[in-house]
Image (cartoon, rainbow, N blue to C red):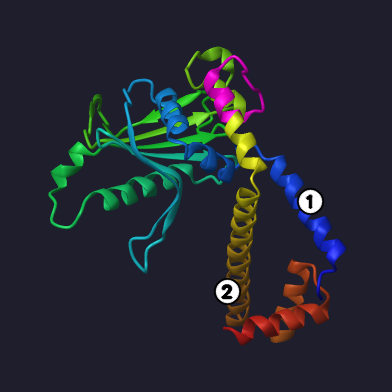
Amino acid sequence: MKQTFPAFQSEMKQRWQAWQAKTITSDLIFEMVMQQPQLCQELLRRALPELTINTLRFVNPQQDVHTGLLTRGVRYDIYTQDDQGRTFILEMQVKDQHDLAQRIRYYQGMMDQQLLHAGEQYRRLAQLPTYVIFFCSFDYYGEGKIRYCFEDREATQPGLTAQDGQHSIVYNATADRRQSQLPLRSFLDLMNGKVDNEDAFIQAVQAEITKVKASRERWLQNMIYEWKLQEQYDEGKTEATLKLLQTLEKRGMSVQEVVATLAETEGLSRQAAQAYYDQLMAVK
């Protein structure tokens, strides 16, 4: 059924209002803001105060990486490298998917595949340290710390590191702000909706957010991004439902029983469930 023009206008108005309500914790807002080299560099300096970061060679938002037909690709929020050959991935994470540690492991491996070219010796990686940094709106490790830093270390001699150049940093925006005066504190506060108007960096971030949200082009990018996410979700849901139906049939359930189960789990009428079943089986 075609959407009427007033209905379309209403939908677009709602989408624009939702776009205006987004904050730095939105993946796309974070990417669009941090693709500005000076802002990304300052965020890295605050997130990694132990390093001296002079110049970023490039800043790539929405970096897609695929290494083979049978391997899972990844999409980094921000992928950047400095003039010393250090590579950084910056990720904004609002929802706890309970797989953060595993994602970091996978990201580190994918980074190495990008950095080490065919014919190069493994020792080349010693000159290419990697940093995966997550800014989280939750405490993944549950210890109440504002900053978790991980390196591979010898199990019985923690002072001995693997010296593999891999670093993983997880920030917890929910931590008690009184526990630390880290330079990143005001950015974590911003994630919680608290704006430090005395911090020039935060003022610059806020100004860039305002600029991004005023752009119709950026708004259209956001809609396309959300449509793609919905499409991926729908495809995944359809595949999962099809596998469930096939499993039920393999266990001896009749078509009628499978359709009844589908109706119950999806909240559909028996007729709608039958039509859905027929559609799924047609593309099996």
Residue 140 in view, yes or no: no
Under mark 1, the amino acid is: Gln
The structure residue drawn at horizontal position 54% and vertical position 35%, both measured from the top left corner, is 136
The structure residue drawn at horizontal position 64% and vertical position 54%, both measured from the top left corner, is 220
In the rendered view, would you say 119 is above or below 243?
A: above
In the rendered view, would you say 122 is above or below 1?
A: above
Specify whether 208 is left or right of 131.
right
In magenta, the rendered stretch is: 191-206
The image quarter containing residue 157 is top left
Specify whether 97 is left or right of 148.
right
- Of residues 241 and 37, the one drawn nearer to the viewer in this rendering: 37
Under mark 2, the amino acid is: Lys
Q: In which quarter of the image is the C terminus?
A: bottom right
* Residue 14 image label: 1
The image quarter containing residue 250 is bottom right
Residue 263: in magenta span: no
Residue 194: in magenta span: yes
- Of residues 246 and 178, the one drawn nearer to the viewer in this rendering: 178
Q: Where is residue 37 in the image (x, y as percent from the top left)?
A: 42, 35
In the rendered view, would you say 13 is above or below 277?
A: above
The structure residue drawn at horizontal position 83% and vertical position 75%, both measured from the top left corner, is 269
Q: Position of residue 253 (x, y in %)?
A: 66, 82
Disc 1 is placed on an element classified as helix
Residue where numbered disc 2 is placed: 243
- Of residues 200 and 243, the one drawn nearer to the viewer in this rendering: 200
The image quarter containing residue 200 is top right
Disc 2 and disc 1: Cα gap in Å?
35 Å
The structure residue drawn at horizontal position 39% and vertical position 28%, both measured from the top left corner, is 149
- Of residues 217 and 33, the one drawn nearer to the viewer in this rendering: 217
In the rendered view, would you say 199 is above or below 77?
A: above
Specify whether 217 is left or right of 259.
left
